[in-house]
Image (spheres, helix red, strand yellow):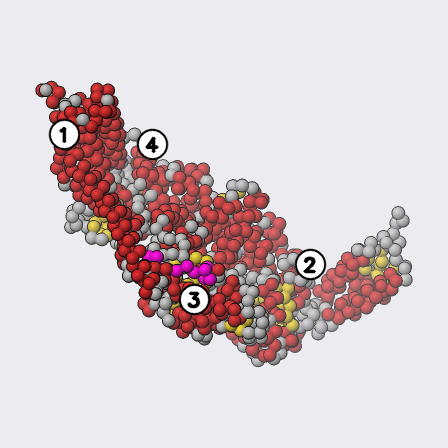
Amino acid sequence: MPQNGVIINEKAYVLGQGLSQKSMEMRRAEETAARIISGSGVIIALLLFMAGVGLLVWEYGFETLFVSMFWTKPSFGMALVCASVLVGCFLFEHQIEVARKIEHMPKKMRTSKPLELADVSGIQKPIDITRFFDPGSIKSLESAFHIATKFGHGAVEPLHIFIGCLEEDVVSILFARLGVSFEKLQDPLGRRLSTRQLGTLSGCSAESNDVLMQAFLGAYFQDRDEVGALELFAQAYVHDPFIQELLSDQNIDENQFANMVEWLRINEKMREQYARFQKAAAFKPTGPMNRAMTSVATPMLDAFSEDLTTAAVYGRLPMLIGRDQEIEEAFRVIEGGRESVVLVGPEGVGKGSVLAGIAQLMVEERVPDLLKDKRLVRLSIPHLISGVSAEAAQERMLLALDEVAKSLNIILAISDIEQMTGVSTGGSATADLAALLVDFLSRGSTFAIATTTPQAYTSNVERSVLGRIFQKVLVNEPEEKEAIHVLESKIGGIEYEQKVIFTYGAVEKAVMLSDRYMHEMYLPKKAIVIAKEVAQDVFKRKGEQGIVTAEDVAKIVSVKTGVPVTNVQEDEKQKLLHLEEEMHGRVIGQDEAVKAVAAALRRARADLRSSKRPIASFLFLGSTGVGKTELAKTLAATYFGSEQSMVRVDMSEYQDVRSMDRLIGAPGSNSGGIFSEAVRERPFSIVLLDELEKAAPDILNVFLQILDDGRVTDAAGRVIDFTNTIIIATSNAGTQYIQDAVQKGEAMEDIKTHLVEEELRGIYRPEFLNRFDGIVVFKPLAQEQIVEITKLMIKQVAKRLEAKGIGFDVTDAAVQELTQKGYDPKFGARPLRRVVQEEVDNAIANALLEGKVKRRDTIILDAGGQMRIQEGQAL
Amino acid sequence: MKTASGGFVATFLLRDFVQRVLTLPVWWYTIGLATVLKGIKNNMKQTARGFGLDVWVKNLFVPMYGETQFSGKLISFGIRLVMVLGQSIGLFVWSLLLFVFFFIYLLSLPASVLGIFYYGFGLLFF
């Protein structure tokens, strides 16, 4: 009969006879029997021994112990002692046999081939995988059988296993971290159970058998000693779409579930790793002396360095998660040609952790022979050069390197190796410590593991003497998922320090938001920084055992970046829904433009936009004074808080290529441009590019990239993030055509098509126009709209007077008159402002200066510029 | 936690007890002996690692404390030789103890059976 199983190391692992209630009961009985035999055996042996010795002492006393008669004369006491030894022998056999029955999980092999289920009936003595299940998972399976029996179900399904696992501690932790309460699952689970097929319980269903097999494989790939309830639980989730749906209802998707399971595994692994490490650390010497006693004291080096292996022995270095590939590559380079290695990666990706990981492996001696019985010593360049002249620094370095050469047991670690090149200290002289190091290392007495950033590698290492001796090993920024795992491994420490508890949501959010909004730092460091800050904040607000939620993380990220990333609150929801009305309070007409801008903002806040591009980008076309800039200002004021939340760039200042320096910084200056710095400081804002048609074509190319990728690199090499900006470009190009076409009464849609296809062709390249989310044509203002605008302007005047306690009113006739005077189809509402200034503001100013108006009076403006003053009530 | 059913437990108790008693004499000098020998071997290895004997032997001719002059080398060799000898003696003493333990193991089963007969039944006949 074919039997499915997997083959690991030439042994077959199968799911025995299929798990049944009886088989589990028998196993429990067997274990109980074994325990009874052990327990009673020990008691009997002890009793026999004590009785025997007691009898002997009572009969002969201690002094006869050395008399031969004592050993030769038959006595009941001695017979009892012998019997106790015999029982002891029996016990020994029993214990060894019980231990021999325990199968050990196969050790994970270093193979890239995935294990697949196959027919293993031809292989002798297949091993039953349920032998590796720990008491927790056996208990969960028993519960699953119990539930199936209770409900009269025909088979144990993944659903039963899922419910069976719920009582386990590890599952409670998982639910608590995910923020799911069991009560919410109870009803749907009950309903689901009532729909299962009834019958006589025959054992596990095919899916459940697969759950057990996959749980075993899961534990195998994790290199665990047993199969825990967590693996069963995780597999039950994977095998039952209903359970996935159930948790989806609680806002837990597959990735989140998998990352949460990984978190618990990481904790477990770190515990095992720590225990193994402690054992190994007992053998590692912590002083300068190696086990072979060949090294010498290194007083000079000690003054400017830190012994990483000693720090690791005392548990002062963080445990490393992942990065196996990078370490392996470094070891390969070292083993291959005794060459030195430089780990190249941006600040915060974990180069220091890789060094710590190497130190830990050296403590455990799980390293190539070249690194065995050695210590990893980190040379501190700042210590070496501080407070002395360049010559003295070089001398110190030479002495330290001399000690390294003599001691024979030191591997150098050098953080930020670029600090060695062109050091100038204490005066005009420049000391190039790099040359000394290279000379020393090339003699082959030892090697170094250094770190640097990609920029420094290109500018200071690759092209200097250091490049000759150091092999580059890249340490890239981890992916989001890996970064979550790294942060999960750090959460235990943060929770212990700050006395708070993190939910999974908070961990995920810290990684996601920092990745999205903090472009100047790298994962995982930026996520760890955020997590620490949030923990502190939550402890202050919620006290000990405060729960850190995703919303707490979002709040801190919002404060740090100025980007609103928290959930949309009720008042903000109302504001977003009625954004058009609010904007129309300031912008008259131009419905299409207002709608487009409001819709873009709503998309952004509902998180429906692409996170790799700006929130939205618009090109506003139309003649002067129709409200293009006003709309941008209104948006800044209504949504971004104030008109100041706007980075305004007059493109007429960027008419030639040289102005690129002002845009993103001059090459080699190591600083950004005026524009890029402004956006860097205020990443959540409106970028207004006024009079775009005046910019040089090369300048437009920079914006082409910004519109497409949402980022630009400044002269200092920093990535400036535009993904939280709304880019609005205004242009007067094609104004004449718009005015003529509107006058002719052409449809707006036709006007826009003609504009893009014909009028703008010579000014902007088609691919540039294509990058905008929307090209909005602003209509010339009609007479009635100018009336509305006049009223708006008068309202503004009234508001200014209100501050002085003076009322202001305008008659309809006056409004009409002002409109007549200020209306010019060519210039839109712009002349109107001037008219209001001249006719209204000036008259009021005169009245105020002449002292004609007092507090509580009302100024009434009538046609012909007549101004009446209505006296207010006396107090 | 549910308790195992009494019937199964009694069956297993009887089975294990009878099996162990019957197989004990043969088991003692086969599987048991092999297990003890393996244990002794592992213990010896651990002890040797603890003493660091292998490191000392490997570096017998390597000068200590970076002393590379002739006198330094000579003294180093001397000290290392003494250390290796001392550690070897320590290891030897420990091996002796393990050997005694092994001897006790070999004898304990027959000795205990004989002892019961000799001391117990002797009372009846002498």
Where residue A714 appears, as percent x and y from the top left, is 55, 70
Where residue B55 appears, as percent x and y from the top left, is 29, 56
Disc number placed over residue A334 in the picture, else none: none
Q: Are marks 2 and 4 in contact (CB under 8 Å)?
A: no
Q: Main secondary structure of the magenta part?
A: loop
Q: Are marks 4 and 1 on the same chain?
A: yes
Disc number placed over residue A585 in the picture, else none: 2
Dot 2 falls on a residue whose secondary structure is: loop
Dot 4 falls on a residue whose secondary structure is: loop
Quick check: A8 left or right of A845?
left
Subunit that carries the residue with mark 2: A
Q: Can you identify the residue that label 4 sits on?
A: B1
Q: Count neighbours of disc 2 (C-alpha within 10 A) and say few if under 14, some if 14 to 19, many if 20 or more.
A: few
Please give the name of the residue rendered at 62% of the width and 68% of the height, measured from the top-left corner: A688
Q: Are marks 2 and 3 in contact (CB under 8 Å)?
A: no
Eye-nearest disc, 4 or 1: 1
Stretch of the chain drawn in magenta:
A292-302
Q: Are marks 3 and 1 in contact (CB under 8 Å)?
A: no
Please give the name of the residue rendered at 52% of the width and 54% of the height, measured from the top-left corner: A529
Q: Can you identify the residue that label 3 sits on?
A: A401
Q: Count neighbours of disc 1 (C-alpha within 10 A) and say few if under 14, some if 14 to 19, many if 20 or more.
A: some
Subunit that carries the residue with mark 3: A
Where residue B4 appears, as percent x and y from the top left, is 27, 30
Dot 1 falls on a residue whose secondary structure is: helix
Q: Can you identify the residue that label 1 sits on?
A: B113
Subunit that carries the residue with mark 1: B
Please give the name of the residue rendered at 25% of the width and 50% of the height, measured from the top-left corner: B88
